[in-house]
Image (cartoon, rainbow, N blue to C red):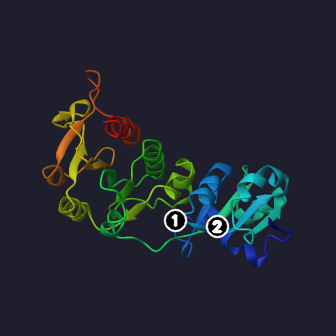
Amino acid sequence: MNVIRVDDPDDPRLAAYREIRERDLSGRLGRFVAEGKVVLNVLFGARRFAAESVLVLESRLAGLAGTLGMAPPSLPVYAASQRVMDEIAGFHVHRGILAIGLRRRPEAADELLATLPARLLVLVLVGISNHDNVGAIFRNAAAFGANAVLLDQTCCDPLYRKAIRVSVGATLKVPFAMTGDAFELAGILAARGFGQFALSPAGQIEIGECVRPDRLALYLGSEGGGLPERLMSRLTTVRIAMASGFDSLNVAAASAIALHRLASC
């Protein structure tokens, strides 16, 4: 490990870590923040994204030997006291493990789909702006073997720090593309021979009775508003059966049920 001890919170080499919370929503010039040992395991293990550096509590170094052993030997690993780390980040970093990752060149949906196998399951997120939900959906996508996630332009960034953390690193592993609007995505998927299911409490078919095509796109909309009616009219609508008098689930919970059913058939 290329360990570099730092004692000055104003060290210019640590500029990308400074005031993390305040800068999450305004962008980091092609960078993102990964937090925690589990997330770093995915970052270094999946190798979809490169890391620029790591900032870690001195007391956590020994326990991170295996994780950092997956990283390039030249990667700078800055070690600091709790006081110095908290001053840099602007809050108490209780996990004591941060990394700066480098974003990839953005992929268009059609470009990403061209790299995937013939039989595949793709999630399409429409208007999901809650970072917890996006992170949890990516975690479910990884758990049930979805091949990719496509997000329309109204969704939040999967590489926002909280989304990465909630996903336990899945946004760094599952291929994704943020592109265009939902109607554009529907046209791209239709041209590539996808069956397209829209998950909705008012769906015509119970998801346990669906016949899954080899190439399937599953659409998920925001809680409350759901998917636009004009979009659903172009798709096959499916629902999750529930007890009488209750017809909706959190979108992340619904994605887990739907993915479990569709991935196993």
Residue lying farthest to the left in this orientation: 233
In the displayed structure, does residue 116 sit left or right of residue 20? left
Q: Nearer the viewer, mark 1 or mark 2?
A: 2
Seen at 56% across and 48% down, the residue is 168
Q: Which mark is residue 25?
A: 1
Q: Position of residue 159 (x, y in %)?
A: 51, 61
Seen at 19% across and 37% down, the residue is 203
Q: Amino acid under label 1?
A: Leu
Q: Amino acid under label 2?
A: Ile
Which residue is labeled 2 in the image? 100
Q: Position of residue 165 (x, y in %)?
A: 57, 51
Q: Is residue 91 visible?
A: no
In what quadrant of the picture does the C terminus appear? top left
- Above-or-below relation of 147 to 237: below
Disc 1 residue crowd, few under 14, some 14–19, many 20+, Cα 10 Å: few
In depth, the one of 128 and 143 nearer the eye is: 143
In depth, the one of 80 and 236 nearer the eye is: 236
Residue lying farthest to the bottom in this orientation: 12
- Above-or-below relation of 48 to 143: below
Disc 2 residue crowd, few under 14, some 14–19, many 20+, Cα 10 Å: many
